[in-house]
Image: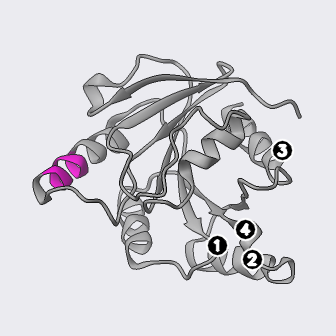
């Protein structure tokens, strides 16, 4: 499968600022530094498309990326660690909830889980919120390359057992999983 070209469209703080589009959208949910920006860059085969950082909490807005007019990816601020005030966090939460519940273009949410660690409390809280609203979702297990090959299937199966639904592995270091992910996203759009 050929990689899709991708371009940054715009950043939005709230639903009213989101771009007008008829393309299906996939919002990326996950803790800070779980690898959402690296995922976008790997999917686009462009290491500079989405800004990556070693400092958690850098993404403060919803950043929209168009993938070859096939679908959009919406990179959301990471939950968990962020060096911002409680007021700013409350505003983010309100804006993100409104976006996730009211944006008509959303095809499925994608929750990112770090393969190197047990599923965290805030990952469970996010999943409970998603389940309460019965929103479509699947999971991507990131940084799978850090897990020994013999244990990768255990990580994937454990995540599937806990969260249910589809679970796809991903590595920003190796492109062995990208084709499956692109095919999965494309099939959801058909």
Q: Are marks 4 and 2 in contact (CB under 8 Å)?
A: yes
Given the current orientation, which residue lies at the most extreme left position?
87
Question: Which residue is at a point 76% across and 67% down the rendered structure image?
Answer: 145
Question: Which residue is at a point 43% across and 60% down the rendered structure image?
Answer: 32
What distance separates the C-alpha of mark 1 from that of mark 3? 19 Å
> How far across and down, in percent of the image, does residue 49 sit?
58, 32
Q: Main SS of the magenta segment?
A: helix
Question: Are there few (<14), some (14-19), or many (20+) residues within 10 Å of tag 1?
Answer: many
What distance separates the C-alpha of mark 1 from that of mark 2? 7 Å
Question: Which residue is at a point 64% across and 39% down the rendered structure image?
Answer: 41
Q: Earlier in the sequence, mark 4 or mark 1?
A: 1
Q: Quadrant of residue 116?
A: bottom right
Q: Are marks 1 and 2 in contact (CB under 8 Å)?
A: yes
Q: Nearer the viewer, mark 1 or mark 3?
A: 1
> How far across and down, in percent of the image, does residue 58 sit?
37, 49
* Secondary structure type for disc 4: helix
Question: Are there few (<14), some (14-19), or many (20+) residues within 10 Å of tag 2?
Answer: some
> How far across and down, in percent of the image, does residue 124 sit?
42, 74
Residue 115 numbered tag: 1
Q: Quadrant of residue 84?
A: bottom left
- The residue tagged 4 is 144
Within the magenta stretch, is there residue 74?
Answer: no
Residue 147 numbered tag: 2
Q: Are marks 1 and 3 in contact (CB under 8 Å)?
A: no
Q: Nearer the viewer, residue 148 or 99?
A: 148
* Secondary structure type for disc 2: loop
- The residue tagged 3 is 179
Q: Earlier in the sequence, mark 4 or mark 3?
A: 4
Q: Quadrant of residue 173?
A: bottom right
What distance separates the C-alpha of mark 2 from that of mark 3? 20 Å
Q: Are marks 4 and 1 in contact (CB under 8 Å)?
A: yes
Q: Which residues are magenta?
A: 88-94
């Amino acid at each position: 499968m050929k990689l899709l070209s991708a371009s940054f469209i715009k950043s939005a703080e709230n639903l009213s600022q989101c771009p007008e589009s008829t393309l299906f959208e996939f919002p990326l949910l996950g803790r800070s530094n779980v690898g959402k920006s690296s995922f976008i860059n790997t999917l686009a085969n462009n290491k500079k498309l989405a800004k990556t950082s070693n400092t958690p909490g850098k993404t403060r807005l919803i950043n929209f990326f168009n993938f070859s007019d096939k679908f959009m990816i919406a990179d959301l601020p990471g939950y968990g660690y962020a060096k911002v005030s409680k007021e700013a966090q409350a505003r983010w939460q309100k804006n993100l909830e409104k976006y996730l519940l009211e944006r008509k273009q959303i095809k499925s949410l994608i929750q990112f889980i770090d393969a190197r660690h047990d599923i965290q409390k805030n990952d469970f809280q996010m999943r409970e919120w998603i389940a309460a609203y019965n929103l479509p979702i699947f999971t991507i297990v990131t940084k799978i390359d850090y897990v020994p090959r013999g244990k990768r299937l255990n990580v994937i199966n454990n995540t599937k057992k806990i969260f249910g639904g589809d679970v796809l592995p991903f590595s920003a270091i190796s492109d062995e999983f990208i084709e499956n992910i692109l095919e999965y996203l494309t099939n959801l759009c058909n």
